Amino acid sequence: MTPIPRTHRQKQNFMNTYTFTKRQPSRKLSSCGKSLAIISSFILFICGCTQKGGSYDASGTFSAREVTVSAQQSGQILSLGVERGDTLSAGQKVGLIDTVQLYLQALSLGVSSESYSQRRPEVGVQIGSLRESLAAAKKDLSRYEALLRDGAVSQKQRDDAALRVSTLQSELDARVSSLGKESVALGSQASATDIQRRQVLDLLDKCHICSPVSGTVIGKYAEDGEFASPGKPLFKVADLSKMTLTAYFTSERLSDLSLGQEVSVTLDYGGGKTRDYKGKVEWISPKAEFTPKTILTSSERGDLVYAVRIAVPNDGGIKIGMYATVKL
């Protein structure tokens, strides 16, 4: 038993010791309470994450139809009037590659084709005199035959007239054949030259840089003044009006999917910000594959999954590569 202090200092020391002894247990209880609160919060966080991870059936990233426009001809790029973010329509002309040499080649071929056409012989004009001579010789032969029956001319005179008709007929046939072959040859040359000219005109048309599809420019790889060669990428355009979400479903959920089915798509902006969209299933993979490492599913075990493409109309909030979840 602690003796009762008698002096003032002894009383003061006794009170300090008693106060310290009374307060010490309360500090221990406070530290234990804080530890329990931290543990409880961690458990709630894990539970919340588990519940959140199981609130969807599949997940994936968005993509769009992208088309890389390349040069179709070689030459200096005279102009390329596109920038990232520009909206283009299908067939819109946006640039031009140097066309001088092709233009001059097309003019030359055009002149050659016209020259071949003008050199084609006029068969009717060139054989007209032969036809007249043959017609006259035939009249003489008829007259000689009539005179021969009357005994006014000899047989030799009639035979000479017949020989002249035969000779003129042979000359006429040979001339017609020769002129016909010449005309066909010149016509073929003119046609070949015209085909070459059309090929050059097609190359000229391909010097005009056009967008093959409607969409938004998402990349530019060349500038004015650079030299282009066939196949060199110039810019990339993507149709952002309709995005495609490629998600992966396990075989357990595959039976609940069908083409044309409407599903709920939740876009994750990060930081707890989300936005909901309606999508439509447009393709289901016919074969299974292993779960990609970058894809999360409601089942955390590795399993065979099926790729599914979901078309989602874009209101401007969906960007290429964004992450989203799917709920059936």
Image (spheres, grey):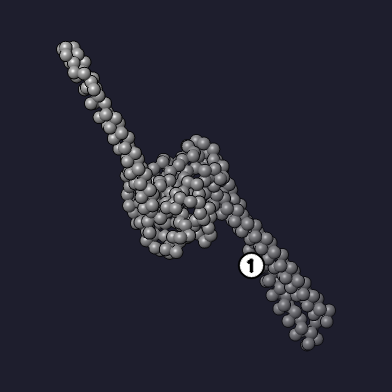
Q: Please provide percent x and percent y for residue 304.
A: 51, 55
Position of residue 135 in the picture relative to residue 198 (left or right): right
Q: State whether residue 141 appears in this view.
A: yes
Q: Looking at the image, is 67 positioned above or below residue 21?
A: below
Q: Which residue shows up at 56% across the image and 45% down it?
A: 231
The residue tagged 1 is 124
Residue sitting nearer the eye, 255 or 178:
255
The percent coordinates of residue 78 (x first, y second) are 48, 39
| Image quadrant in which you'd find residue 94 | top left
In which quadrant will I find the C terminus?
A: bottom left
Q: Residue at x 80, y 80 (%)?
A: 158
Q: Position of residue 208 (x, y in %)?
A: 48, 47
Across and down, in percent, residue 18 comes to: 22, 22
- Amino acid type, residue under disc 1 in the picture: Gly
> Front-most of 139 and 131?
131
Q: Viewer-proximal residue, 290 or 175?
A: 290
Q: Give the residue displayed 68% in from the left and 66% down from the top.
A: 180
**In the foreground, 189 or 302:** 302
Relative horizontal placement of residue 9, taking residue 72 as reference (left or right): left
Report whether residue 118 is seen: no
- Name the residue at 45% across, 42% down: 219
SS for tag 1? helix
Few, some or many C-alpha atoms within 10 Å of disc 1 (few <14, some 14-19, many ≥20)?
few
* Position of 228 relative to 54 (above/below): above
